[in-house]
Image: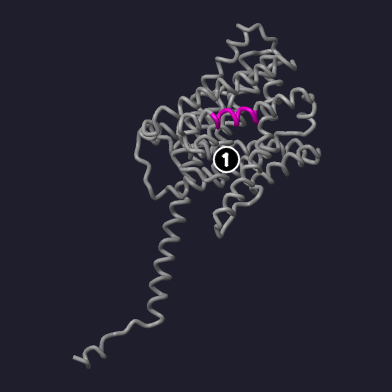
Amino acid sequence: MSSEVRNLPEPTADRLPATTAAASAGAARARWTGVTAGAALCVVGAAIAMGIGRLVPAVNPMLIAIVAGALVSNLVTVPAWIKPGLDFSAKRLLRVGVALLGLQLMFSDIVGLGWGVIAVVVAIVALGIAGTLYLGKLLGLSWTQRILIACGFSICGAAAVAATDGVVGAKEEEMLTAVALVVVFGTLMIPAIPLLSGALGLTDTQAGMWAGGSIHEVAQVVAAGGMIGGGALAVATVVKLARVLMLAPVMAYLGARQRRAAQCAAEGTQPPLIPVFVIGFLGCVALRSSGLLPQGALDLARLAQTALLTTAMFALGLGVRVGLLRSVGPRPFVLAAASTVWVAGIALAGTLLVA
């Protein structure tokens, strides 16, 4: 028996590493395949959404992409192995798109609004976030769910939701719920603000400022401003972009907060003080403000930014499932409705004070 035992092949030092290396290589290939396939699906979805957007200019392709992704997710089964590609599109590509969004902004445009309007924009974002967080706490929602809804509704919609998620690390269902709520309630605001502006007797300038200060997505603001007419669209767009600029200080604050939390928890890794995409966003604003970029480069960057964000929105839409929205219960919907009214009320009060 002892000789048989001695004659059995013994594990050698070269066999185990070879097996491990083969398994690692196989896992890497599978992940790469998933990333490629998932990203390709999102690119195709974005291309279709952008094509529809060209045929129907009144509808922004990013909104089309979210709705299309949600329809695909609820009508067919999306294979799990492409999820790495969906995550890559919804996070990495979105952050690049948010950074490029800064090329739409010039510091001079914001300053040109006047200090009164700037103060109103700051109040909309600060009070909007604070009030939504408080209401969400009364409803018993988690802090991460509250902050996602608060930033999405107070700053710039789905892009702000995803950017906030990149800083605070919320659960996937919380992020997807917040994105779906932005689409639903922001879309309802498109006809509501023009109708209410007419009922209240607001001027075009006042109505445009109210639209830019209260509606969630940039695309939704453009749609509402176009419905109001006159000079409302230009005012609405600049006020909304001023709210977008607030993304930088808010994300920097959240990054510092998460860093302090990590230090208190004595974790080995800490989030950056200021997220890289926020630095990129501010860099793009500075670059646009410098006047160094020719119009052709700005047009190309705008196309790239739209393509990246539309791709990311399609990926986010793929995660929005009816079963998920049913499972979260009515409380996020109640908070979204209350936040919409709260932000719109602050914006209206500020508009009547300064415009």
Residue range in magenta is 125-134
Splitting the image into 4 quarters, where does residue 132 fall? top right
Residue that protrudes farthest toward the left in the picture: 1
Instruction: Please tell me how many numbered marks the rendered image carries.
Output: 1
Splitting the image into 4 quarters, where does residue 20 fall? bottom left
Q: Nearer the viewer, residue 81 or 300?
A: 81
Residue that badge 1 annotates: 164
| Residue at point 68%, 34% (across, down) | 246
| Residue at point 55%, 23% (across, down) | 340
Amino acid found under the numbered disc labelled 1: Thr
Q: Nearer the viewer, residue 108 or 152?
A: 152
Rendered view: 133 above or below 226: below
Rendering coords of residue 75 (x, y %) = 35, 33
Q: Could you classify mark 1 by the number of other residues whose Cα lies within 10 Å: few (under 14), some (14-19), or many (20 or more)?
A: many
Rendering coords of residue 217 (x, y %) = 58, 28
Which quadrant, please, contains the N terminus?
A: bottom left
